[in-house]
Amino acid sequence: MLRIAVPNKGSLSETAAEMLAEAGYTGRRDPRALNTLDARNDVEFFYLRPRDIATYVGSGALDVGITGRDLLLDSGSSAEEIASLDFGASTFRFAAVAGRFSGVEQLEGVRVATSYPGLVGDFLAKSGVHAVLVKLDGAVESAVRLGVADAVADVVSTGSTLRAQGLEIFGPVILESSAVLISAQHDLPGIATLQRRLQGVLVARQYVLMDYDLPAVLLEKASEITPGLESPTVSPLRDSEWVAVRVMVPRDETNQIMDKLYDLGARAILVSPIHAARI
């Protein structure tokens, strides 16, 4: 039986649960449950703090887990990323009082507050910089104003929270993070199935099916607009001068592609959602 670690709270929790449900797994019904058995799929889910998941998986206590790339790297766990899950995106940057620092090399010997000392420490070491890391569990943005640190290293989205504390971003990006699937034992039975199912969910979210009718003489030009993942499916119509085409297209390009096909001469252009896929 495959033992899967899932975030029990935080920004990754809800989307991870939705992805697993779309992939055909049955999760917990009671939000207070610490684990639940999905006998039909021969898996057991364990609901843990996102920060602890890499440790459990790396130790072999659990087989596979969903967590953030940032948390995996910060943990120092022996678990490895085996697939990106394309949600929970975040960017890590340095920040300090406006004009104080312009590059990471200027952090030599100064205090840097962060909730991710492992991640930030590794980045600074690779940059040849020796700073004093101040570990905080939250409200890192206040560390400079309160005199605990000279700079901070934290997740940045719009930067508005940093600006509210009189800070500005400087230096390179520390990490682009997102939710990932991790394991220390890649060849365990069930992991490949889990990966395929989650990949199928991602495909279903990123693509739609497009059907259209087209004069056969325009097929080559239409295929340049809608090449598909491998090639379009083409079927004859009763009118031998026309063909029916079915193809997968990126969801966020749907309307632009429809416009191009219509201008080319395609008609009866229809779009359908994909509920599951195996690519």
Image: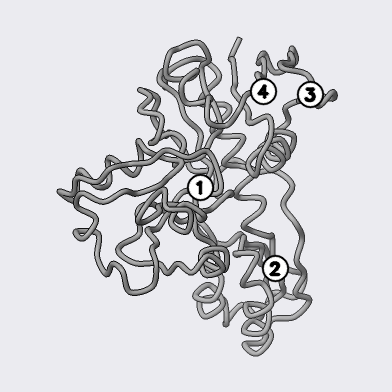
Tell me the element at label 3: loop
Of circles 2 and 3, the one toward us is 3
Distance Cα–Cα, label 4 vs label 3: 9 Å
Q: Using residue 62 as the reference point, say whether residue 186 is left or right of it.
A: left
Q: Quadrant of the C terminus?
A: top right
- Residue placed at 60% from the left, 21% from the top? 4
Q: Using residue 44 as the reference point, say whether residue 279 is left or right of it.
A: left
Distance Cα–Cα, label 2 vs label 3: 44 Å
Amino acid at circle 3: Arg
Q: Which residue is mark 2?
A: 244
Pointers 4 and 3 in contact (CB under 8 A)? yes
Tell me the element at label 2: strand
Q: On residue 28, which mark appears?
A: 3
Tell me the element at label 1: loop
Q: On residue 178, which mark appears?
A: 1
Pointers 2 and 3 in contact (CB under 8 A)? no
Pointers 4 and 2 in contact (CB under 8 A)? no
Q: Which residue is mark 4?
A: 47
Dot placed on the residue nearer the N-terminal end, 4 or 1: 4
